[in-house]
Every structure is written in C-alpha cells, then in structure tokens.
Amino acid sequence: MTHSDQAAVVFDHVSKSFGANQVLRDVSFEVHAGTALCILGRSGTGKSVTLKLLVSLLKPDNGGIWVEQDEISRLGEHDLSRVRRKLGFLFQDAALFDSLTLYENLALPLRRLTNKSQQEINLSIDRVLRQVELGTDGNRMPSELSGGMRKRAGLARAIVLEPKILLADEPSSGLDCITASEIDELLLKQKAEHQTTLIVVTHDVHGARRVGDRFAVFDHGDLVAYGTADDIEGSSNQTARRLISER
Amino acid sequence: MTELFEFIGKVSLFGLRAITDAFRSPFEGGQIGRQIVDVGNKSLPLVIASGLALGTVMTFHTRSSMVSFGASADIPTIQSLAFFVEIGPLATALLLAGRVGSGIGAVLANMRATEQIDGLEALSIDAFKFLVVPRIVACVIALPILTLFMDFSGLAGGFFSEFLASKISLHLYLVRAFIDLDWANFIPPVMKTTVFGFIIGTVSSFLGYTTNEGAQGVGRAATNSVVASSLLIILADVVLIKCILFIFPDHAL
C-alpha cells in the first residue's frame, strides 16, 4: 500500500489472531497528521487490539503498521523506543503506577527518556497537571483519585512527553456524561494546541462525534466502514449505520 | 510431565534474561534499593521472631536426650551447627518464599491485569528491567543477610532456653557454640541462600509477570509463587548440599 506524505498512521492489510480467535482481518486505513480518528464497534471486535498493535505491545500476524515513516512491527528495540516516544497512550483504566504518586508517575518517563533538568521536569509536570486540572494533586497516590481524576491523570502521563500521536482507549468509560465530556474537551484541546493526531477507541458515539474527524467501524474483526460521520451514516453496512446514529 | 519441563525451561530462560539484564545499563539502583527495603527490612521481624522461636523449641527438644547421654555440654555446639548449616538457610528461604514470593507474584500479576506493565512498555521503559530485575537482585542480596539474622536469633533462642534450664553463662554458651564451627560450616550454607533468593525472585516474578488471567490470575500467581518457590528451594537444597559436601568433604557432620 502506498500512503500519503501527511499520513501519521497507516494500517496496511493487518491481521491478528489469538489462537483460533481472529481478532482483526485484513484491516487497512490511514490517519492524517493532526486529525482525529474514532474507532467504534461492539465489544470484542478488535478495537483495543488495534491500539496495542500501533504501539507494538502486540505484533501483527500479517500486514504492516506505519507510524509516520517507520514500519513499527519490524523495528529493533532502539528504533522502537524512538518511535514510541512519538506516541502517548491513555489506557482504559489509566494504568497509573499504583506505588508512585501522581507527580512520580509523570516524572518517571521524563527522567528516563529526556535530558531535562529537575527544574525543567518540575515545570513540565506542573504545566501538564494544570492542563488537566489536577494542579494541586501531584502528591496524591492513584488510589486516592476518583475515576474522572484517574482518567485525567492518565491523560497527563500520556501527554507529558508531548507526543505527536495520542491513543486513547475508552477515555469516557465508567464516567458520568459531564466528566466524559470534560475528557473529550481535553483531547480536543490537545489536538488544537499541539496539532496532535488522535486515535480514540470508544463506545460513546456522542463523544466520538464531538472529537472525531473520521470514524472507523469494526465488526467481528473486519473494518466495515471508514470515513466521515456522513460517510458512515450512508454506509451499506447496517452495524455501522446503527452505531453512528446511536444517541 | 511435558508441562513441568516446559515450565522449568521458561523459568530458566526468564532467569537467564534477568542475569544478563542485571549487568546492562541503565542500572536500576533506586528500584533495587526500594526492593531490598521491601524484601529485607519488612521481613526482618518475621525472621528474627521465627529464629528465636525455633532456637528455643529446638533446645527444648534436644536437651532431654542430650542430658540422658551425658552430653549436655554439647547442646550449644549442636544448636549452632544445626542453625548455621541447615535450619537457618532453609527456614529463612521458606519464610521468604511465603512472605516475599507471594507478594512479588501478586504485585506483578496485578500490574499486568491493570495494564501497568503495558503502560511502562508504551512509555519506552523496559518493564522487565524496571520491575523484574530489581526484585530478583533484591532477593539475592537480602537472603544471605536475613539468614545471618535467623542463625543468630536461633542461637539467642537456644541460649535463652538453656539459660532457663542450666543457668549457663552467655560467654560459655558462645564458646561452646562456636568451638566446632569453622568457615566451611558457615560460608557455603550462607552462600547457598543466594541461590534460594534467586529461585524466589525468579519463580515468583515469572508467575506474576507472565500471567494473563486478569484479576483471577493475581490470586493464582501469589499461591503458585509460594508453592513453586518452596518446592524448588527444597530440591535445590538437596543438590547444593551434595555440591558443598563434594567441595568440602572433611566437613560433613
């Protein structure tokens, strides 16, 4: 597959199985830099696997995955580390390190992956925590944070290295609609202010319509529809039409 | 049987990777220090209390037999040899397999279930080197030190018990305790606890780190860590004793 110069992420005929269970089947799509793609679909259709393949936590059985100009599934340890620094990952349950304070959670990647001085690290953490409205919570342990705060803390850790591409796995799951929309606002703010490419896996169609420029709909491991909201609404696939029109 | 050999093979490769990673930069000094505190400091009260109790009880049991043979003067010698050569290393390792092994298994399995390990990898941080290597190194360093505490606590318990029975002085007890003990009775058994520490760290880390069963896997990893570590420690003890006797044939009891 040839991909355009402005592509931040390209999936090229990707398949992935776990034993006999085929999770993704010959999936191809492209995400342009600075745009937001929302991945929709029923549970167990390979949405989260798509994100884990993208950050090389899983390897595809077939096909290629490009992050900018790098084919991520073929990279060695050093190059993979370089490419991963372009990516931020907001996990479904935030995946904060529960033995570290919020400040230490954010300081860990900065200390290990950058040459910043302690003062610069403190400034970066302070800026990011204020950005997600947790400016006074740096000394709290993850267990002391509410669900919404944990999500925002997870987002803070995902963006602290200033990634070009931000992956978010169910950013609104388990949150009330007001908190969920606050998380969406933060994602949009990140995209607008830093031209970050967003790839968001979600069940929240309302939130997806607010955040997404384009949508990919998965069903039983197949990419059944891809395009703008209007494209999906006019899709020949019934599951895609139902999903995008849910309110 | 195939599964057993597969398990041993996987654990061996896991341990081998930990050894090679331990000598590769970046060195996780801070993490190792934190783990030594966790493994060592927090286990110290348990080890000392167990040593005192074991030492006291052992003297209770041996005293009547020794007196009937007119060998009560040898009680401190037997106590020290028993503790330094076998009881101290083995009891410490089994205690640590329970306290530390279950903890390591549960913590790592929980980190896997809650995607914290994926989180580290996604941040380009080598999760194996950051989480597993420090725990194994901490076990290897802490076990010999804790064994010494167990040995001397056992002697203290033995002295307490003997003092109540015969009013023996501390000086005389210590002279008799160490009269037949030489370095060959002391150093190899303490050194073999580094192997026990490696077993505890490696097996429990393997079971926690590689679990993929969500919350259910946390409990299973903790339980299996204790069972597998304890079993392997006892098996390794047999092999290591044979090795020690082969190297120091004149010092068999």
Image (spheres, grey):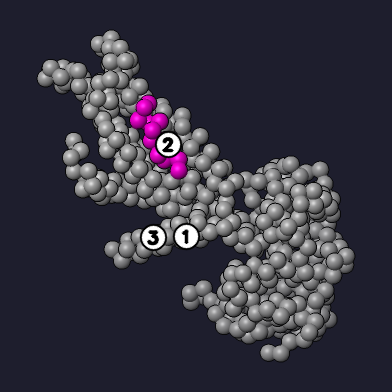
Residue A216's place in the image compared with B144, above or below, is below
Image spot of residue B193 (x, y percent) = 36, 43
Side of A7 relative to B210 (left or right)? right
Tell me the CA gap for discs 3 and 1. 12 Å
**Residue type for callout 2:** Ile
Q: What is the magenta range?
A: B141-153
Instruction: Identify the residue under disc 3.
Output: B12
Q: Earlier in the sequence, mark 2 or mark 1?
A: 1
Q: Which residue is mark 2?
A: B145
Chain letter, disc 2 residue:
B
Q: Is there CB contact under 8 Å for labels 2 and 3?
A: no
- Per the image, the residue denoted by label 1 is B20
Residue B182 appearing in the image: yes
Mark in the foreground, 2 or 3: 2
Q: Earlier in the sequence, mark 2 or mark 3?
A: 3
Give the side of residue A182 with respect to residue B78, left or right.
right
Quadrant containing the N terminus of chain B is bottom left
The structure residue drawn at horizontal position 57% and vertical position 48%, both measured from the top left corner, is B29
Q: Compare marks 3 and 1 and give the one earlier in the sequence.
A: 3
Q: Secondary structure at mark 1?
A: helix
Kindly state the secondary structure of the residue where label 2 is placed: helix
The amino acid on which the numbered mark 1 sits, given as a three-letter code, is Thr
Q: CA distance from mark 2 to mark 3?
A: 25 Å
Q: Nearer the viewer, residue A135 or A170?
A: A135
The image quarter containing residue A101 is top right
Magenta stretch, main secondary structure, is helix
* Count of numbered badges drawn on the protein: 3
Of all residues, the one furthest to the right in this rendering is A193
